[in-house]
Image (spheres, rainbow, N blue to C red):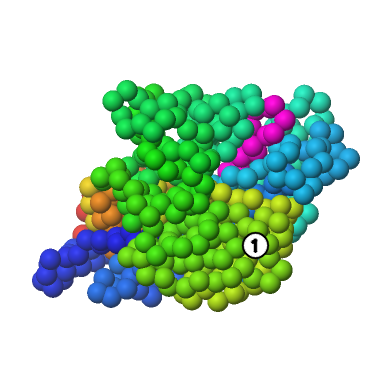
Amino acid sequence: MNTQFKPLRRAASSARSALSLVAALTLAGGALAGSKTYTFDADFDLGLLSGVNHAAPNNNQLQLNTVGTTFPVMWIANAGEDTVSKFDTNSNVELARYRTWFGPAGQAGHINHLGNAYSGPAPSRTSVDINGNAYVLNRWFANRKPVLLKLLAEGFIDRNGNGVMDTSNGSTALPMADTNGNGQIDDSEITDERVAWAVQVGDQNGLGRALCIGTDGNLWVGMFNTQRYYKYSSSDGSLLAGPVATTPTAGQPSSGNWQPYGCLIDKNGVLWSASLGGPLGKITNTASNTGPYTVASFPGGMYGIALGNDKVYTGSNNRVFDPATNTSSSIAGLSVSSSGIVVDGSGNIIAGTNTVQKVSPAGVTLWTAPLQAGGAYSVGIQVDANNDIFQIGYSSNRVHKYRGSDGAPLGTFPVGDVPYTYSDAAGFAARNSTTPTGTWTVTYDSGAAGTAWDRINWTDSVPAGAAILVQYRTADVAANLAAQAYQTVSKNVPFTASGKFIQVLTRLNASTTNASPVLFDLTINTKVTACDVDSDGDVDTADMALIRAGIGQVPAAGDPRDGNGDGRIDARDVRACTLKCTRNNCATN
C-alpha cells in the first residue's frame, strides 16, 4: 500500500565489510554442533519469502518489500447460507467452507434463508490477522446478539481426541447442530476443528456491521443499531473493552455520531469507521484495553472503507480523507459508482459496483473493466497476494477476478450463497496498513527422527519502533508441521523441542515511520548432548575439566563425558570433545 519501507543500509563499503566480518566470526564461534546457518541470498531462497526480499543493493539480507502483499488466501462470507469460504487466490479454488451457524437443513438450530443476505445470522464481515487466522462476524437480523468466530489458518483443536484434524475440505462444510437447544454455539457443538471459538458479542439486536483488527492483534466490533464499538481478544474471544459510543468526545471534531458499517485500524492504532450515509468515524488509542478513547467524526463516511498512502478512502461517495489535516476531497480520477473500495500494494485505488476502475494516487486512470460475463451486482472488492483484484459477486454466488496490472478478466469462480464481504478478507490492510509486516519461513531437515533442538540465533538491525520476531515448530514428519502451533523464541536462548524437521518463521515488522528491520543471518542449532557435561548448552573448557576429572571411570549409557562413545572415559574423550567446542579456543562465556 505504497508503504515505502526503508531498510537500514550500512554507511559505506568498509562498514559493510567490517560488519560482515563480525557476523561471520560470531557465527563461527557461536554455532553449535549440528547447526544450519542462513546468510546468503541462496540460503534465504531455501525458504518462502512473503513481503520480504534480498534484492540489490541490499543483497544477502532480508528487508520488507516496498510493494505490499498478503496471504494467497481470501475468506468470503456467504451471507445466504451462514458459511465462510476459504479461497485460494493463486489456484482460484475454494479450499474449504466453514459454518458460522448451525446447518445444513435438518440440523437443530438451522435457519433457512438461502438467497437472502438480510435474514438470520447472515455473516458479511471477515478480517484476517498477520498470522493468517480469519475472523467472521454474523450480523444477526433476528433480535439476537451478533456472533464472532475465529478460524485457524494452521493447526487445529482436537475436540474429539482422535489425534487427527477433522475439518472441511472443499465446498461442503461439516454439519453443526444446536444439540442443547440454547440458541448459541457452544464449544462442544463445534465439529470443524479449524474453528477455534465462537462467541456472542455486542448488544442484543446490535446488528454487527463492522469488524477490524488492531495493532495489538485484537478485534474491534461495531454495532450498527446501537452505535457502539466493543473490543475482543483474538486469542479466546473474551471482552476486553467497551462499549465505546460513537458520540464524539467533547472538544473533538464532530459531524454527529454514526452507525458502524465497516472499519479498519491504521498503524497508529486509530480506528476509522464507515457508516451508511453518515459521517466518517474515528476512535483513537485502540491498543489500550482501558482507554481513554477519543471519538471524533467527519463528513462523508458512506459505504466501504480502505486505508493507504497514510489516508482513508471511502466508497459510494468516492472521498479521500487526510488525517494530517482533517480534510477530505474527491478521489482524483475515480468516476465509477462504488459499493466497494480498496488500495493495492502500490497505493493505487480500486473501486466499483459493476464497472471496476483503478486509479493512481495522483488521479491517473490505470484501467477500467466491465463486470465479467455471468456476473451481477457486486459488493466488496479485495486485493490478493499478487495485487490482482477480486470483486465479490453478491447476486452471482461467485467472485470475479481481474489482473491488477491492466484489468484483464481472469475468470469468475463459485463460492457460497450470496457472498457479501467487506472488511479485510485477505489480510491486506492488516499486513500493510495496521501492522506493516513480512515473513520468511524455512524448514530444515536434520536427517534424524527425534532430533533435539536447542536454540536459534540471528543477527539483525532493528530501528526504533520496528521488530523482528522468530518462531519455530517441530515434527518428525514434514506434513505434520502445519498442525503444530508456533513457539516464540528469544535470540540465542535455549529451548526444548524435538523432531526430524524444524520450521522457523521470521517476521519483520516496520516502524510507524516505515523503517524496515533487516535480518542478516539466522542459525538453527541442535542440542549438544555428548561433551556438554554441565548441560549449559555449549561445550567449553568447563566441560573438558569435568571429563578429565572422570578419567578411568566407567560411564553409564548416554554419559556426556564419553565423547567418542567407546564405553570408557579417558584422554581420547578429551580430544574428541575438544573438537566439538562451540567457541574459539574452547572458551567459556
Q: Residue 429, can we see it?
A: no
Residue under the point 61% across and 40% down: 137
Q: Determine whether, in the image, residue 205 is placed left or right of residue 268.
A: right
Q: Quadrant of the N terminus?
A: bottom left
Q: Determine whether, in the image, residue 516 is placed left or right of residue 364.
A: left
Identify residue type, mark 1. Answer: Val
Q: Which residue is mark 1?
A: 399
Q: In this view of the protein, which residue sits in the foreground, 30 or 460?
A: 460
Q: Does residue 497 show up magenta in the picture?
A: no
Q: Position of residue 174 (x, y in %)?
A: 78, 47
| Secondary element at tag 1 | strand
Q: Position of residue 491 (x, y in %)?
A: 33, 49
Look at the image and give the residue range highlighted in magenta. Answer: 134-146
Q: Residue 115, can we see it?
A: yes
Q: Residues within 10 Å of mark 1 (few under 14, many from 20)?
A: many
Residue under the point 25% across and 45% down: 325
Q: Position of residue 205 (x, y in %)?
A: 64, 27
Magenta: main secondary structure: loop
Q: Quadrant of residue 272?
A: top left
Q: Quadrant of residue 376?
A: bottom right
Query: How many dots with numbers?
Result: 1
Q: In this view of the protein, which residue sits in the foreground, 138 or 510?
A: 138
